């Protein structure tokens, strides 16, 4: 038990140090990227630093498997150089026994990444998108899906408009049973419009079977209501922005994702991408464990054998290859080419079995 705790502490220390170094590098790189992206907008260095802090957690979450590989490499290379690995093996402990502590630490880190880091990344990514749209377009455009239907908000110089639709087609290009509520720049409502359908085209929203009520003080709304067969309203939204808001599961916390999937189904959208993302997040601890096993299969040996650099490079390249396969399977699952469960769980399980095969081969000679 003392030896396992010692290995766990060494592995956790390496993981924290590597994470801190990479986080600092990501901030520096992303700071330059934010300065380039918002070069035409005067937001100051405080604004750039704030945008960087909101965007960096998402990138750190993305490279977590790489951090796990590097932490494993650092652990076993340091143990090999100090001959502690030789002493451990000479005491009768097998390679799989020595790996128990790093594997359990990686699994716990994976659970914490799903349960704690995922909501943080979702919140910061959502806030980053909102601020980015506000800076670029001059007004915030937001999308929300609830049991009451699909809600949109578009902003502009003429004020804000809140849009509520009961349902939509699969690609969000046409909304049905739509209500538009327009607000003046000062904040008061000025017009309500209801339509049987609304299609977002290049010139704006094209409404069918329309009825419009003025909402001004001293004006009889029903008496001054107007009816149109078709009506075109300007819009600051685009189909790409709506689809990105709907299809990006990274801005939804894993705790809210099951309910959000249900709301997507009720609104008429395909929730397949969100289902794949949910299962992939649940399988993340096992994929991190696979990264530890892959790195240890190449670096759990004494340095006198030579080829340390090649072994480290091979472990990193194999880790990247498995990560690519995982991403490819995720895309296949989102497109409906393979089942959701297979797309999310097959890569980590296959990676663990591959790494175990390499370890057993090295152990038996």
Image: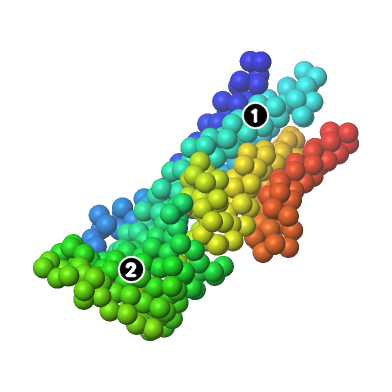
Please state if 329 lies on the left or on the right of 63 as rendered.
right
Identify the image quadrant of the N terminus.
top right
How many residues crowd mark 1 within 10 Å: few (<14), some (14–19), many (20+)? some
**Tag 2 or tag 1, which sits nearer the N-term?**
1
Label 2 residue SS: strand
**x%, y% of residue 281?**
59, 45
Q: Which mark is residue 178?
A: none
Coordinates of residue 222 in the picture (x, y in percent) = 24, 70
Where is mark 2, residue-wise? 180
Q: Quadrant of the C terminus?
A: top right
How far across and down, in percent of the image, does residue 232 sit? 35, 82
Please report the residue visible at 41 percent of the width from the left and 83 percent of the height from the top: 202
Query: Percent position (x, y) of residue 47?
Result: 27, 57
Residue nearest the viewer, comparing 7 with 247: 247
Residue 91 figure quarter: top right
Q: Residue at x 15, y 64 (%)?
A: 186
On residue 104, which mark appears?
A: 1
Say few, some or many: other residues with alpha carbon within 10 Å of mark 2 (under 14 / 14 to 19 / 20 or more). Answer: some
Closest to the observer, 20 or 240: 240
Q: Secondary structure at mark 1?
A: helix
The residue depicted at 45 percent of the width and 77 percent of the height is 199
Residue farthest to the top, as pictured:
2
**What colouring does the structure picture have?**
rainbow
Residue 349 to residue 128: above or below: above
Identify which residue is drawn at 75% across, 43% down: 349
Give the CA distance from mark 1 to mark 2. 53 Å
Instruction: Look at the picture and state if 325 lies above or below 184.
Output: above
Q: In this view of the protein, which residue sits in the foreground, 232 or 14? A: 232
- On the question of residue 25 being in view, the answer is no
Q: Is residue 334 visible?
A: yes
């Amino acid at each position: 038990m003392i030896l396992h705790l010692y290995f766990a502490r060494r592995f956790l220390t390496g993981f924290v140090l590597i994470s801190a170094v990479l986080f600092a590098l990501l901030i520096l790189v992303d700071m330059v990227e934010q300065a380039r992206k918002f070069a035409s907008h005067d937001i100051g260095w405080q604004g750039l630093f704030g945008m960087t802090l909101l965007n960096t957690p998402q990138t750190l979450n993305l490279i977590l498997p790489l951090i796990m590989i590097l932490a494993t490499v650092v652990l076993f290379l340091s143990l090999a150089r100090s001959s502690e690995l030789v002493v451990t093996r000479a005491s009768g402990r097998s390679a799989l026994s020595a790996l128990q502590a790093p594997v359990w630490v990686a699994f716990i880190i994976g659970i914490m990444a799903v349960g704690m880091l995922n909501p943080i990344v979702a919140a910061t990514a959502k806030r980053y998108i909102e601020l980015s749209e506000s800076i670029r377009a001059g007004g915030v455009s937001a999308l929300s899906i609830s049991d009451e239907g699909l809600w949109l908000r578009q902003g502009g110089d003429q004020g804000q408009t809140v849009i509520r639709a009961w349902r939509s087609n699969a690609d969000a290009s046409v909304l049905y049973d739509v209500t538009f509520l327009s607000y003046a720049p000062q904040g008061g409502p000025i017009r309500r419009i209801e339509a049987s359908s609304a299609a977002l085209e290049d010139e704006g929203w094209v409404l069918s079977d329309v009825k419009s009520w003025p909402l001004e003080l001293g004006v009889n709304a029903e008496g001054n209501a107007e009816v149109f067969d078709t009506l075109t309203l300007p819009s600051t939204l685009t189909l790409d922005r709506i689809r990105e808001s709907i299809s990006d599961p990274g801005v939804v916390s894993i705790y809210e994702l099951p309910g959000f999937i249900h709301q997507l189904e009720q609104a008429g959208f395909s929730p397949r991408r969100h289902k794949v993302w949910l299962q992939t997040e649940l399988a993340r601890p096992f994929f991190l464990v696979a990264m530890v096993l892959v790195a240890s299969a190449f670096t759990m040996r004494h340095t006198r054998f030579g080829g340390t650099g090649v072994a480290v490079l091979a472990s990193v390249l194999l880790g990247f290859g498995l990560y690519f396969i995982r991403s490819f399977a995720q895309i296949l699952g989102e497109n409906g080419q393979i089942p959701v469960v297979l797309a999310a769980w097959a890569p980590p399980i296959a990676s663990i079995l591959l790494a175990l095969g390499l370890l057993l081969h090295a152990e038996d000679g």
